[in-house]
Image (cartoon, grey):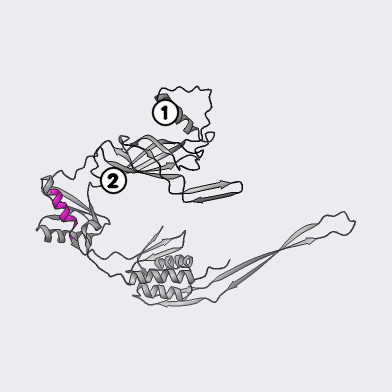
Amino acid sequence: MNMPNTTLLKKMLGAMLCAVVLTPFAHAERLKDLASIQGVRQNQLIGYGLVVGLDGSGDQTTQTPFTVQSVVSMLQQMGVNVPASNSLQLKNVAAVMVTASLPAFAQPGQTLDVTVSSMGNAKSLRGGTLLMTPLKGADNQIYGMAQGNVLVSGAGAAAPGAKAQINHLSVGRISGGATVERAVQSSVGQGDAVFVELNDTDFSTASKVVDAVNKRFGAGTAAAQDGRVIRVRAPMDSSARVAFLGELESVVLTPAQTMAKVILNARTGSVVMNQAVTLENCAVSHGNLSIVVTTDSTASQPAPLSGGQTVVTQTSQIDIKKEPGQVMLLKGGASLADVVKALNAIGATPQDLLAILQAMKAAGSLRAELEII
């Protein structure tokens, strides 16, 4: 097999290098971009429902019996009895899962956007209407009710031997399609303190947050509990606490430099390195191997009047070409620019980079955390 061309790799790494090199090592950020307040979070909601009014693009009931069961159950609740001997052939109904996120401090009566996703074999949800669907949380309690017209941002058409489709037709959205029925209690307004949680655990950044908060609100206001959670004293009055949290989120500080990390995606061959990646002294050898397999078909004819049959035989030829290997010396303390330049010089492809960087890490010359996703 032929190794892929390195042109795309060079463009990708070049663009990545420019983006990283032009990024300053340290810059000020707001606390709200680095952390969140403990207890201020979303809660996921889910529900099972039916979409009706489809133009013949619903579930095929012979393959999705749960759709028929749902329709029969719904009709029985409305006082309509369907004989068990009847086999419903529904084309305008689809079974769907409805999902939404309940934001923090949401109160009964507020509306939420919901996503409606087909769980059967419906061809399209376009033009359908979601019937009243309870939305439950992880505790199996109902926190919202959803209903409304499904908006699908796509279109499709089919004819014998031809089919055209734009975007995805099995998922739709209802803007403001759910109403909150129950509020989730929050602990933010309780006690004499709030807890700030960093998005990423970092002892240096936690220490910087404590210093910035104490400088802004006075000594003793903040204290770090660990590398992620900072305890901050807050006013007891609810109105004063809201104003305090608003000022707290606006505190500006310079976070600590992130640790050196290399992210490898083994499925796509993507390699992303941050600006802190450096190397110890090492030598890298690389050589391209090309294998070409060619198969020719030859017909073997029997002699006249021999009664034999024509036989097709295949002849395969394998050619192996190996380019001369190159050894590249990478000096200690090399920056990201030196690493990328050196790997490009030996013609490394994305898949080669995966193996090379893993070998560097195993040899102890790559001064970075290696993460494979």
Left of 31 or right of it: where is 8? Answer: right
Could you say which is closer to the camera, residue 218 or residue 105? 105
Magenta region, residue range? 241-251
Residue 30 position within the rendered picture, expressed as x and y whole percent measured from the top left: 21, 60
Residue that numbered label 1 is attached to: 74
Residue 318 occupies quadrant: bottom right
Could you say which is closer to the camera, residue 63 or residue 131? 131
Instruction: Classify mark 2: helix, strand or loop.
Output: loop
Could you say which is closer to the camera, residue 344 or residue 60? 60
Specify whether residue 310 is in view. Answer: yes
Instruction: Classify mark 1: helix, strand or loop.
Output: helix
Residue that numbered label 2 is attached to: 42
Q: Nearer the viewer, mark 1 or mark 2?
A: 1
Residue, x 45% and y 74% (percent of image)? 344
Residue, x 53% and y 31% (percent of image)? 89
Where, quadrant-wise, is the C terminus in this rendering?
A: bottom left
Residue 99 position within the rendered picture, expressed as x and y whole percent measured from the top left: 37, 42
Residue 238 occupies quadrant: top left
Report the Cα–Cα distance between label 1 and label 2. 31 Å
Residue, x 60% and y 68% (percent of image)? 291
